[in-house]
Amino acid sequence: MTTPVAKEAFIFAGEPSGDLLGAHLVCALLAEEPSLHFFGVGGMKLQEAGLELLLPMEQFQLFGFTAVLTSFRKIYRQFQTLLAHILKRNPPLCILIDYPGLNLRLAKALRKRGYKGKIAYYISPKVWAWGEGRIKTLRSTLDLLLCIFPFEPPFFAPHNVPARYVGNPLAQSLALSPHDPSWRDAAGFRPGSPICSLFPGSRKSEIERILLPQLKTAALLKEAMPELQFGLSIASDNLLPQIRSALSRTSPLLQGSLHLVHTADTRHLMRASKAALAKCGTVNLELALLNIPSVVVYRLSTVNALLARYLFRINLPHYSLPNIIAGSTLFPELIHQNFHPRVAAKALLPLLHESRERDLACAGCRHVQQLLHSEFSPSQAAALAILELL
């Protein structure tokens, strides 16, 4: 056990993934230093781990550029309240988890107001996606940047940002998740027929823009492969009315061939799939780590697409994590105006058969798995790095 170094620490986690990562990190820190006390922003997982809640993370969950613009006043008030509370308590340590839009501003505001404690950032902001404008903030505010991709510390090294790779939590989570070979039959899929899984996203705006083109793609695939079945992932029961509305407008060809799969069984669905049609996000990396060839799709609203292109100048060679990690097109990407059902069906069809395209995608998946392999728990490695910093 380490010598006590701090009585309390502030933590900010602004969304469910950060809440879970934060909970694992807090447990790992308490295992090494039981006297630590944590306060800040988070969800149920962090509270269960022992967080003293100042504000629930739901108050900071705004998605899309337009939502941020329309809610600026509310965000500003909450931000100032939070900043004042941190400065008043003056903890020796602040741990910021993901959520760069707010966390980088918080780190910058703390330093500007004279905060002298240590600031650690868990999960590097994707400056390699958004451009290098944020690097100056990272260098001037952070004492430690904890990275979950092995290419990140070498990227930050020339910029004098103190970055350390601690392993990938998703890779570890998938390695530990149970596999039930009987799930497929129990879920009602026909034995022996291939499955193509559909992942439209977890937000209502994503369902609105992505699901119907995915279903039209599925209908085209069904014409070409009558034996094909589909599993549609449902991230939340709140999305069911929207999903059923989309299903009512799709081809009769899919009736009896499409199964709704709830979030608890998502990884069972992935493992049972021959290929997948998935929105751009973390799900792409999950599929790669499970060796499931995929086509990546995404659509933005017209306003957000214009903001992304001209205001934020987002223009990347790759958008999905497997492709970024591999540095090549492991999964085909159909983003915004390039996402059309016929184009998606043409890209998916060879992945559903034994083909050169499928072999290359599977080889790429194995390469990503090797790159993210780690013998240590990311939360333990991150906890030790933070305690070493203190």
Image (cartoon, rainbow, N blue to C red):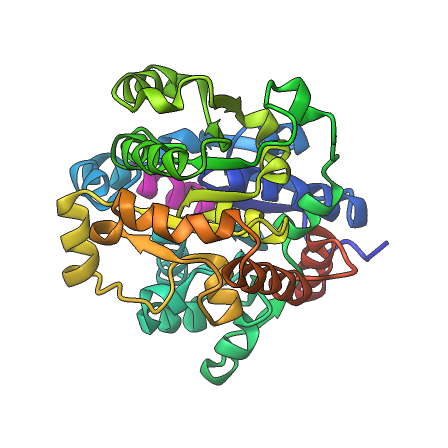
Indicate the position of residue 111 as horizontal and vertical percent values.
40, 62
Magenta stretch, residue numbers: 78-88
360 or 207, which lies in front? 360
Report the side of 5 relative to 221 (left or right). right
Say above or below: 269 vs 358. Answer: above
Q: What is the x, y in percent for residue 63?
A: 30, 39
Residue under the point 52% across and 40% down? 17
Is residue 256 visible in this depiction of the protein?
yes
Can see residue 40? no
Q: Looking at the rendering, in which quadrant would you find the N terminus?
A: bottom right
Residue placed most toward the observer, 74 or 269 = 269
Residue 20, above or below 127: above
Q: Quadrant of the C terminus?
A: bottom right
Q: Residue at x 63, y 48 (%)?
A: 290
Q: Main secondary structure of the magenta part?
A: helix
**Magenta run includes residue 84:** yes
- Left or right? Give the position of 253 relative to 5: left
Q: In the image, is 374 to the left or to the right of 238?
A: right
Q: Nearer the viewer, residue 135 or 344?
A: 344
Q: Position of residue 256 (x, y in %)?
A: 46, 17
Q: Residue furthest bottom?
A: 158
